[in-house]
Amino acid sequence: MRMRTYKRWRGLLTSALALTLSTSACSGDDDGQEQPLLGVGEACTDDASCESTLCLSDLQHCAATCASTSECEGSDVCADGFCVAADYCDEGFGPGCAPAECDPECGDNARCESLAEGGASCVCDAGFEGDGFTCLPEGSDLCESDNGGCGDPDESRCTVVTIEGAPAVECLPVNPCDEDNGGCGDPDTFFCTNPEPFVAACGRINPCDEDNGGCGDPDYNTCTNTAPGDVACEALDACESNNGGCGLEYDYACVPNPGAEPGCWFIGVCEESLVIDASMEAVIRAEEPDTPHDNVWTLVNPAGFSTDFNGSGLLIDAVGETHSLYSFDIDPGDYNLDDLWRVSLEQVTLLWDHDPGLPTTLDTRRVSNAWTAGVDGANDVTWNTRPDELSDALSSSRIDPAGGGTQVLSDPSRKMADMLTPELAQGESRRVSLSSISNGPAVVFYSRGVSNPMLRPRLDLRFLTCDHIRPAPVASASVNRLEPAQTYTPGEGLLVDSDRNEAFLRFELQIPSGATITNARLELTTDEMSDEGQPSEFIVDTSTEDAWDEAAITWDTRPAAQNTELGRFMLDPARLAEAPETVGVETFELTEAVRESVAAGGLITLRIAAEGDASARFFDRSAASYQQPVLRVIYE
């Protein structure tokens, strides 16, 4: 980069050298050919050829020298002793290379030299010294002695300032924020920080920086500083991202709770099925008590009912009462028998016919294994040699009269699970024989010989594979508004009838310490309801207390209801007329109530009430295990 001082020095050197050479030539060196320097305006190629020592790079002629702009022609300005265009710049030299104004502005007793070397800069006026921003009279140093009277230099700094043209002392604290908020303004709106001694830095206070501005948990609420001292809060729905952290969407439902932690509810599959194909099957008919059945299908038919299956010709009239027999060899393998939850006999219809005046259910019963004594014996079983029945109905499968076509008949039964559990516990593999008996329809089923395995008769054993408990209630009772002092009698069932009767269930829940409850399901079984012919609706909520005695509870002393609905269910009289019905309530609200109860000690009282004129009687805790109310709780 060309520098002004260098150019002027170089110009003087060049002139001196020319004078020396000229003198030498006059002194007798007639052979010397010295080239004269070029004058102002003459064409040039380099600075050394010009008398002024500057060859203008844009015009390629020698520049004129000057002391002020008034000496220059046209619009040229005087820059460092040369007349140049106002925008001239060559390798860092010229007024066009630097800003015309000083930024920041110069201090008192200083001026801006816009054409200074290296760009516009502040310089102190004559008689003052400093950096152009602080200019004091030359020779003044009021802070040199005793820190200028400002006290301990570790606590206060002495600074010389100019007041009305004369130097004066200003004492600055080490932390300027200690006085008048460092000059930052209202301390409720602006803050002052002291990043280094004697320096104050100001900023606006953001209320959101402390306690999220009072907006709540910052994970679920945003705080925005809309104006000095003001905030705007917005509740977030955590379920909108990553399923709220609940886990895989097909296993967990995220229940929105804007502004707070969302609810996580397990909706995944907690059951695994062990499916066993029938190892033997047979059909026995009362109309031909000594004749074994040898067809490729199985059949059930109620007593006194005949059909030709809508003219199909598959069966003739008067087949009489007919049962199907099945045998299953069961190996539970690694399944825990304590987790056996339900069992069902699955049969697939081939043809069926139904008398509208009769029920549409088929009962499954346990029978003796005597008919399976050898393959030939199974094939030869007849009505007269049929096995003894070992149980009443374990389950009741229902044909849908409006369903038509092929139907899979299955009724997952807690009663059958209770029956099979002790049998399976006796060995690694156990044989179980069942009979299928019709209460109304005549049905032809696919047999075990069909090529499609999904059509064969099967036994489906369902095991709960999640960590769970499923306690029966420790107390149950029903109360009557019309007899407000009457107490409950165990074994009479739990009557729930319009606004007259309510039922109460108390459960004691114990789960491992630190476990999290993810799902709860209440199950009730009934075999009696009103005969109005319309589905009835019932509501489940919880009570305000758990300290009630089932032997002493009355309408007048019953615990108050929370009146917070946990769920509701329907009962269909058409289904109930054919077999007992089990209903379930499985909601997030019920799960939350169970969580709160476990956290508070493990007791929860549920109230069952009727909606409108609904009426039904449910089994109480004194019923058989498969009929008792049960609260299944899943945890992890």
Image (cartoon, rainbow, N blue to C red):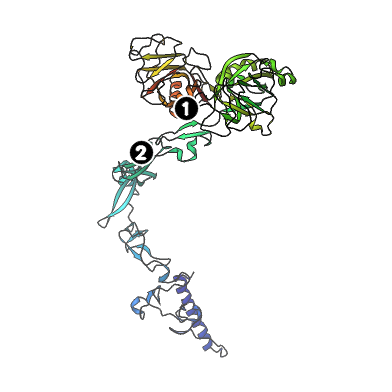
Question: Toward the viewer: 115 or 417?
Answer: 417
> What kind of element bears circle 1?
loop
The reply to whether residue 173 is visible in this rendering is: no
Q: Residue at x 45, y 38 (%)?
A: 239
Residue under label 1: 586
How packed mark 2 is, by other alpha carbons closer than 10 Å (few <14, some 14-19, many 20 or more), is: many
Q: Which mark is residue 213?
A: 2
Instruction: Name the residue type under label 2.
Output: Gly
Q: Residue at x 52, y 35 (%)?
A: 247
Q: Is residue 134 left or right of residue 391?
A: left
> What kind of element bears circle 2?
helix
Question: Toward the viewer: 361 or 151?
Answer: 361
Q: Is residue 450 left or right of residue 552?
A: right
Q: Quadrant of residue 500?
A: top left
Question: Toward the viewer: 78 or 240?
Answer: 240
Residue 623 location in percent, x, y? 50, 13
How many numbered marks, from 0 up?
A: 2
Identify whether 557 is placed above or below 235.
above
Q: CA distance from mark 1 to mark 2?
A: 39 Å
Residue 229 location in percent, x, y? 31, 42
